[in-house]
Every structure is written in structure tokens, then in C-alpha cells.
Amino acid sequence: MSEDKVISVLIVDDSAMIRKVLSMGFENDPRFKVAGTAHSADQARKLIEELRPDVMTLDIEMPHVDGLTFLAEVMARSPMPIVIISSLALEGTEVTMRAMELGAVDVIAKPTAGVDRGLNPIMEGIRTRVAAASQARLARRIPALLPSIRRRPAMVRPAWPKRPGQKIMAIGASTGGVQALARILPLFPADSPGVLVVQHMPDGFTSAFAKRLNTLCTMEVREACDGDLVQDGLVLLAPGGQRHMQLRRSGFLYRIALTAGDPVCFSRPSVDVLFHTVADTVGANASAALLTGMGRDGAAGLLAIRKAGGFTVAQDAQSSVVYGMPAAAVQAGAAWDSVTLDDIPARLLNPTTDETSPHMARQTDDSLDRNLVAIAARQFDRG
């Protein structure tokens, strides 16, 4: 979709007030056009055929046909970018995770503040995420759940790192990352080096997401806590919304630090914040991947890991739902290679820095320095 193309939105919600709030919020931004509104799945079916919107917002709680059932129907018959906007999103519940598995590009908490408290602050984040969703490559979506992987028995992970010089893997993702992580994390063996993950999600979502991933993976997956020890066989997911996740050295061990701070690249937790600390503390023993997502978060941090001697890779355009963050990394020379989603686990576990890679030409230290400075300047300008 062209960046200057007006994004047509179909709003589906049984609440007339919410339809009005969302309509006003989108119409106040010249990037959007409200193609129509619907109070039920039956009405939405007709409008989808008639209006062919670029993206649809959908509530989960609706009469007759609930939002999840309708979501599954639309994705099976005529796939389109769908953003769930629901009060259930505040709870980070199983139903939220189910919506993502069924193909929703994003899930957002329904606005709770009245129009009199200011519509623009409420809608700013919603518009940003709906715009990202409108760019989703639905034809390339990859099934998130593999029944055969669910049945694989988990192995007992070691209580302590085996040796000094511990290897650590780091992954960053945003829009489309829920499905991508559910696809690739089960592919890591139970005794893999520790994995640190930042997935852009609001407060409350990451705990439910970690629990769901833990049922799929042979590695243990849990939401990170301040002071957690990074261990082989353990995936730690940054808590959403309130704090950044950093890596700190503790002797020859590594621990998690959850720290306060302003959003970086409009994100908290930020992939860049994690990646920079991985570069500083782990250096050449780090492997990192930047997955699907809108914006630039993670590009500068991935470049720092590469400059520190670590292995870096970006998800390719064909397998990304939104090719924003990986594209920024490739353009900055931050990734040794750009590969399909399914290839990422093997590349992180067995890093190779092939100088003749067709995807990423080798750059000099001077050019890497220039890229890092340029990215940092852009981030400072944008806040």
C-alpha cells in the first residue's frame, strides 16, 4: 500500500457510542477514511463485499455471532487486515491470544475515556496501530500453531550456565510478532542458549502470551521479572507497557533489569534498549534477530550487536506481516543476513557470517559508524 494512499476503515462494534468515537477519531486524521460502520457480523459481511475496506476494526463481544467466530470466518473466506478493539483486551486473556492466532493483526483495548476528555490522545495510538495493520501481508501469513510441536515433551533445563562466555539470543518484534514468535520459538531445542524477547504489547498482555508460548515450546517461557537469571533452556519475555528490559552482567552470569524510562522509538519496552545492553554485555557471544513490525525500533541496537562482534539477522520482506523494523535494520547494515521466518532459529543457533551473502554486503567499520550515528540522530529527533 502506498504511504500517501488514504486508508479506508470499516468499524464493527455493537456500541453506537464506540462507533462514533472511533469514527470521529479516524476522520480527524487525513490518512484515514471511514468507509462504513456495522453493529453486527451480518451487517459487516455485506459492507465488506460492498466497500472492500483496507482494514477492519472488530469488537469481540457482539450479538448473534461473536467477534472471534466472525474473525475466523473472514480470514477463511476473504482475508483482510483486522484489528481487534475490545474491552477484553484490557485483561490479556486467552480470548485475546486466540484472536491473534486466528489472524488478527493487532489487539487494542477499547477506548474507555469520554470524548470530553480529549479524543486525539485516545486515538493517537489506535490510529498508529491501525495504519500499521493496513500494511499487513496477509497472503504470506504463516500458521502460528503446530499441533505436532505441542506434543513434544519438555526437557529439564540446566539450573546454571555451563561455563563462562555464555551465549545469549535476543529477538525483537512488533506488528505480526505474536504469530511469528509462536511459529519459531517452538523450533528451539530445550537446551538452547537463553532467549530474551521484546514484543511490543500493552501492559497485561505479555503474561498471557508467555503462558501460551510455554504450552508450545520445549524451552521454558515466562514473563521476565527484575533480577531473573538468564539460563540455557529459558525464554524471558519483556513485560509490556511500563518498563524497559535490559541485560546486566553479574560475575560471569547475566541477569535481567527492568528499568523505568521514556519510550524509545515510541515503544516501551523497546527492542533498541535491550539490544544495546546485549551488545555491551555479551558482545561476540550474542545472536539477535529483528522480526516483523512497523517503525525502526531495534535497527540501531541490532547494528550495535553486529559492531560488537555478534551475529545479527533480519526477517525478510516475504515472510514479514509488516516489513518496517527489519527493513530499517537491513538499510542500516545492521543484519548479516535477511532470511525467511522459518530459517531464523537455525541461523541464531548456528551463526555464520558469510561475507558473500547475496542479501547483505560487508560494510566497513566507518560505514557502520555512520549508520549508527544517523539512526541515533533520527531517534533523538523523534523522541
Image (tube, rainbow, N blue to C red):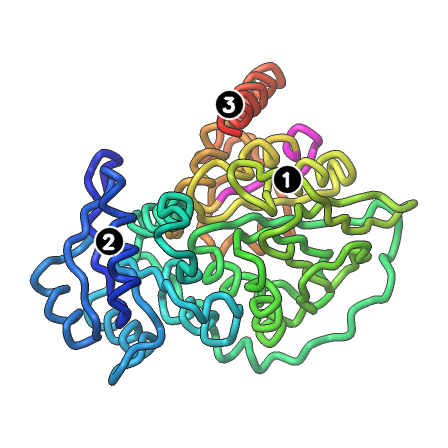
Count neighbours of disc 1 (C-alpha within 10 A) and say few if under 14, some if 14 to 19, many if 20 or more.
many
Which stretch appears magenta? 305-314
Q: Amino acid at mark 3?
A: Asp
Question: Regarding mark 3 in the picture, which secondary structure is present there?
Answer: helix
Q: Amino acid at mark 2?
A: Ser
Of mark 1 and mark 3, the one earlier in the sequence is: 1
Q: Is residue 96 above or below residue 199?
A: below
Q: Amino acid at mark 1?
A: Phe
Nearest the viewer among 288 and 136 is 136
Give the residue at mark 2.
23
Nearest the viewer among 24 and 310 is 24
202 left or right of 68? right
Residue lying at 13% horizontally and 57% vertically, measured from the top left: 52
Residue lying at 48% horizontally and 50% vertically, measured from the top left: 174
Count neighbours of disc 3 (C-alpha within 10 A) and say few if under 14, some if 14 to 19, many if 20 or more.
few
Of mark 1 and mark 2, the one earlier in the sequence is: 2
Q: CA separation, marks 1 and 3?
A: 29 Å
Give the residue at mark 3.
381
